[in-house]
Image (cartoon, rainbow, N blue to C red):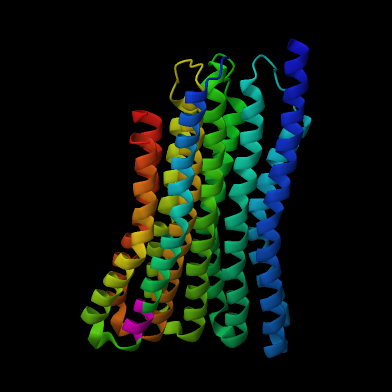
Amino acid sequence: MTDDIQVWVKVAAFIGGGMAMGFGALGAAIGEGYTAAKANEAIARNPQISGDLFKTMLIGQAIAESASIFALVIAMILLFTDFAAESYVMVSVLLAAGLSMGLGAIGSGVGSGFPAGEACTGIARQPAMNGRLTTNMLIGSAVCQTPAIFALVTSFILLFTNFSDRPVSPTWAAILGAGFASGFGAIGSGLGGGLVAQASCEGIARQPLSATPVTNVMLLGQAVTQTTAIYGLLISFILMFKGFAPSQSIAESMALLGAGLCMGIGAIGPGIGEGFTAQSAVKWISRNQSATASLTRSMLVGQAVAESTGIYALVISLVLIFVI
Amino acid sequence: MAIEGTHIVQAAAFLGAGLSMGLGAIGPGVGEGLAAAKACEAIGKNPMEAGLLTRTMLVGQAVSESTGIYALVIALLLLFVV
């Protein structure tokens, strides 16, 4: 019997590692491609500063790459660690660790590419704003990476916590649900945060005098956009650390898996939508600085309404975990 | 582990509830975000009409919210009634 578990744990580790790196490569590749395309456009527009543009492109791409590097680390750990095979729970732990990091890297990878590309365009347009644009790009892309870091934290907790003393059913489903919640939950916020940072880089290049309100509102908009990823992280923590009583019924397991999927998938839409809202608000603050107050107010009201469906998903997840 | 028919039905209802609310939240989330984005654009172009624009935005968002509420209702029905 122990041999059997050993085999399945190895299978899960390899599949998990493949999924971590496969999904994890998707986002960063798209984001960096966008940056390179924008950098080429910028060099065509202003070839005299091609050195500066090349440097900015590389810095921006390096940040977008980090989400993918997290996925590589998790994939390496999954491939080259000998995991103790005491219980079948380990199978779902390894699959969940790979899924969480793989899916979690998609949004941040694509999102971080947007501000980097727009910073290149902006520097070509306003070479004097090089410093301010690079700083703004770095802040915006760093915030974009937070959902990927949430996914990384979940993966590390899964890999380095001993779940073998938990009952196999329903713990396997709770663990898998935790992976889906933080993995899917990171996609929307990563993408949305990138859209906001893109608009702020464009705005600073267009109207350097508006740099301060643009950066401030960018951070505010990104913070609201991150909330759905935080819901995903919250649900995945509850699923990992709440001890579940042993149960022979498959219904119990599916309720926990459903809770993770519900919060994870439910966080995608509001994350992207709130990103669109803040993108537009930041864009128009740079064009019409006198309307900053009313634009910020409308942005927050609009984001709050878009958040509501994410909160419905949170409620249904909590009902599935605690009430059913 | 004995799997009985009623357990499978219940399991499907729970999983279905989670998927209903999860997938159902994507559309309204993106749609309401776009509505608010266009409202911000309009306020940027014409700040004098901020009140009217915010009101219109909220009505439009409420309408697009309705599909999210349908998903919520179906999820609750699957959890507590079916």
Rendering quarter of residue A163? top right
Q: Residue at left 70%, top 76%?
A: A37
Q: Nearer the viewer, residue A107 or A199?
A: A107
Q: How many marks?
A: 0
- Magenta stretch contains residue A153: no
Residue A6 lies, with reference to residue B17, above or below; the image says above
| Residues in magenta, as a range | B39-44
Q: Examine the residues drawn in magenta and state their main secondary structure.
A: helix
Q: Residue at left 48%, top 79%?
A: A204
Q: In the shown orientation, is residue A266 left or right of residue A22?
A: left
Q: Residue at left 40%, top 57%?
A: A223
Rendering quarter of residue A155? top right
Quarter the C terminus of chain A occupies: top left
Q: In the shown orientation, is residue B77 left or right of residue A31?
A: left
The x and y percentages for residue A9 are 72, 24
Q: Nearer the viewer, residue A110 or A324?
A: A324
The x and y percentages for residue B20 are 45, 47
Residue reaching furthest to the top: A1
Q: In the shown orientation, is residue B13 left or right of residue A149?
A: left
Rendering quarter of residue A303? bottom left
The x and y percentages for residue A4 are 76, 16
Q: Residue at left 59%, top 48%?
A: A104
Residue reaching furthest to the front: B5
Q: Is residue B70 visible?
A: yes
Residue A75 lies, with reference to residue A61, above or below; the image says above
Quarter the N terminus of chain A occupies: top right
Residue A313 lies, with reference to residue A274, above or below; the image says above
Residue A301 lies, with reference to residue A262, above or below; the image says below
Q: Is residue A229 visible?
A: no
Q: Nearer the viewer, residue A271 or B66?
A: B66
